[in-house]
Image (cartoon, rainbow, N blue to C red):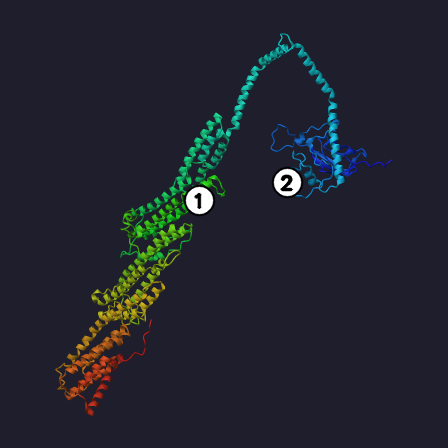
Amino acid sequence: MSRARQPPLVTGISPKEGAAWTKVTIRGENLGTGPADLIGLSICGHNCLLTAEWMSASKIVCRVGPAKDDKGEIIVTTKSGGLGTSTVSFKLLRPERIGILDQTAVWVDEMNYYDMRTDRNKGISPLSLRPSNPLGIELDKGKIPQKDMELTFPGMSGDFTSENFSATWYLIENHSGSSFEQLKIAASNLKKQATKKNEGSLAYVKGGLSTFFEAQDALAAIHQKLESDGTERVEGSMTQRLENILNRASDTADTLFQEVLGRKDKADSTRNALNVLQRFKFLFNLPLNIERNIHKGDYDVVINDYEKAKSLFGNTEVPVFKKVYAEVETRIDALRSLLLEKLLQTPSTLHDQKRYIRYLSDLHAPGDPAWLCIHAQHKWILQLMQNCREEFISGQRVGAGALDPEGDTRPSALGRLSHTASLKRGGSLRTPRPSTWRFETPQQVQFVEKLSDVVIGQLPNFWKLWISYVNGSLFSETGEKSGQVEKSKKNARQRQNDFKKMIEEMTHRLVKLVRGALLPATLPQAEQSLYGGWENKTELTGAWLTQIIHTVRACHEALSALEIPNDLLQVIQDLLLDLRVHCLMVTLLHTTEDVKRLAEKEDWVVDNEGITSLPSQFEQCMIQMLQSLKEPMEIKAGEINVLQLEQVQDQATELSVGIMKVFINCLEQLSTKTDADIDTSHISVDLSSPDRFPGIQEGFSPTSEQRLLIILSNCHYLEKHTFLNLADHFEKHGFTGIEKITRVSVDAVRQLDRNLFEAYIERRADPIAGSLEPGIYAGYFDWRDCQTPTGVRNYLKEALVNIITVHAEVFTVSKDLVPRVLSKIIESVADEMCRLMQCVSSFSKNGALQARLEVCSLRDAIATYLNAESNASFKMALDALPQLHSGADKKLLEELLNKFKSSMQLQLTCFQPPCIQPVKR
């Protein structure tokens, strides 16, 4: 006899809890030698043998049945070991039972409703359980990819419940590592399962055999009775009596339940109607909800509801639904009209425009709402620009501003330049201004800035709307492709030329309006009435034109930042070029007028070089002019150098030369004014300044000769300093033709210098030279009959004093003019002295000595300022005199000369060469 086996022992179960029909794995010891050895398995007191699958002596897989106990042990029974024990327990969870007809939000496993048979049917293995391991051996999953299996077995499946089940696939997938012995065991298990299935079916038939017999007997008796009655309807037959009984039962039932059934039918009808209303209340309430949401502005809700109703009832054939849906369509048509009206309203924001276009697109509005919006915005922007002009032309805006007493607004314009700031992209065109700014600014400037604000405020949104239309983002913010987006792109491609014409029309309108206000001569005659009309407005200065150029440049930069093609903005570049040229010419012309008025500011106060403030004022005026032209002449991106244009070069050079000539004419006019023409009310003298002539007192009014000297000194300074400085400034600011400007200016100032110098010499030299002859022959003096000389006569002293007076006058104005002026005066005096000596027919001895004494005294006294002409004149005068042969006469001549120099030493000191050189600027 073999040794008896140990009873089964369950040591583990996984999972340890679960609902009915939960698949569990039981592990333990001595759990049987094979599937046939396993004769019993209960969990929580419920027999689970039907679902048990023996895997090995230590492992069994089964499903937990609907046991009565919530918690219990796992008991395994085998033929070889008998009834086993368990060291673990299983907890049965009882979920809420869901009926087959109950509504549920989740999928319910039908396994829960499988009616498990009792123990007498334990031989039946239900197919619906689909054992996970039909072979009954351990699984050994392979690592072959699913794709390779599908390629190897096309159209087949490894699922044994599938119609295309492939056993080879299943074995490769689940038992690729199983040995041949294990596969033989698996084949034996399959045979046993088939035998058990056949035995279970036969046992089921044997168990209900008596019931089948009884049913068969009843059916045979009914058949026999019917055959005995025959097939015809015979009065009193069984079938006839049965029919009569059934009819009376039906009539009695109708009598009893007709009223109840009628009420039931009516209640069912009402209930059905209410159910329909409840079920389709969305549709029936939709017209009213649409009106309410439109009133609140919840267009998104309306569109969503409409799309839902359209998908559900758009093609319905139910009359009631068709009627209600027609009402919905009526409300939606009204909404389309309302949205289109709001879309075409102006002004509106870009956000609202996109929103309304998207709404109309979602509502499948006819036509192209986006293009209608673009067209409406285009017309509105053009109208805004035109209205801006009409507003200023009609005088509705404030006036051009208060003018100064001379009718010139340029000082305030120059002051405005300091308030002009660079425009940053996306910023405001204008910087904060004082409250009185509007009353100081000319209307043309206000108009251009207002016009630029309109363009910069509206054209970017207009351009962005077009870009959204082109790329389809009007209809899909996420950029997803759809039929509407593709349709939009197609429409945009077809209308590119039309939109380009719109942009061109707006830029041309902007340029024409600005030209009409500032450059009306550049417009055709037919357009001047439409864009002009500014003739009665204030003429603009260069400073205001500079601000306008700044504004137009800012407008161009803002439009360029939108990536608008350059060819559409070229017309603005052309306008900027004409404005810069116009600003240059106007500034030069106004500077000419300013220079003309400089003569009124001459105060005749000289510094230690004999220069008044007039040259400095002229130079500062020119420098300020060049500085004011710095911004207009600056070359921005895409612009050309105005000063490189040949025609502009010639005009600028001629106007610059004209400014120089005007200033020289001012100097000439100042030199020719009489004393009565000089206005000294504006003259103020700084007595504390060491650079001013100390003899000039308050209320000083120069004589005509002093004015000549002052202007001569100014002319000299202009030639040596001012014109050279201005040439450097012209070159620094890019002007051309500087050599011509300098050459013409220097020639003109030199010509003025010669004329003024001759006029001064004529005024001062002629009286001195003319006083010599009367002085010589005063008291009936006769060279042939005169006494022995005792000294130089008074006429010569008076002439020297007069020369000294001229010296003082010239020295007071300019030390540098003294040699030039005195040399010319002495030349005139020497020439007159020579003429007088040569006119004497004869001299006595004393007369010859007297004449030689006076000629030598005059010559020696003014020897410092003698030139070649005056030396020749004195030599000719001495040659005309008889020579001194006596030593006594020569000695007497020398003594008398020394006496003269000694007595006139103080007066003659002024003729000495200066020791201190004048300080140069």
Which residue lies at the image location 13% right of the left edge and 84% below the top edge? 841
- Please tell me whether residue 36 is drawn above or below residue 264 in the rendered image: below
The front one of 771 and 72 is 72
Dot 2 and dot 1 residues touching (CB under 8 Å): no
Q: Quadrant of residue 55?
A: top right
Label 2 or label 1, whichever lies nearer to me, is: 2
Residue 390: image tag: none
Work out which residue is located at the far right of the displayed protein and give it: 1
Depth check: give the residue in front, 844 or 126.
126
Looking at the image, tell me whether mark 2 or mark 1 is earlier in sequence order: 2
Q: For mark 1, what is the residue?
A: 470
Indicate the quadrant where residue 847 lies.
bottom left
What kind of residue is marked 1?
Val
Q: Tell me if mark 1 has few (under 14), some (14-19) or many (20+) residues whose alpha carbon lies within 10 angstroms of its own.
A: many
Does residue 680 appear to the left or right of 173 in the view shown?
left
- Viewer can see residue 691: yes
Amino acid at pointer 2: Glu
Circle 2 Cα neighbour tier, 10 Å, few/some/many (<14 / 14–19 / ≥20)? some
* Residue 632 in picture, x, y percent from top left: 35, 57
Which of 887 and 795 lies nearest the eye of the viewer?
887
Query: Which image quarter is the C terminus in?
Result: bottom left
Task: Left or right? Give the position of 521 relative to 343.
Answer: left
Query: Which of the image's four quarters has the N terminus?
Result: top right
Secondary structure beneath label 1: helix
Image coordinates of residue 911 in percent, x first then y, are 26, 79
473 is higher (above) or lower (below) than 700: above
* Residue 347 in sight from this viewpoint: no
Tell me the residue that label 2 is attached to: 150
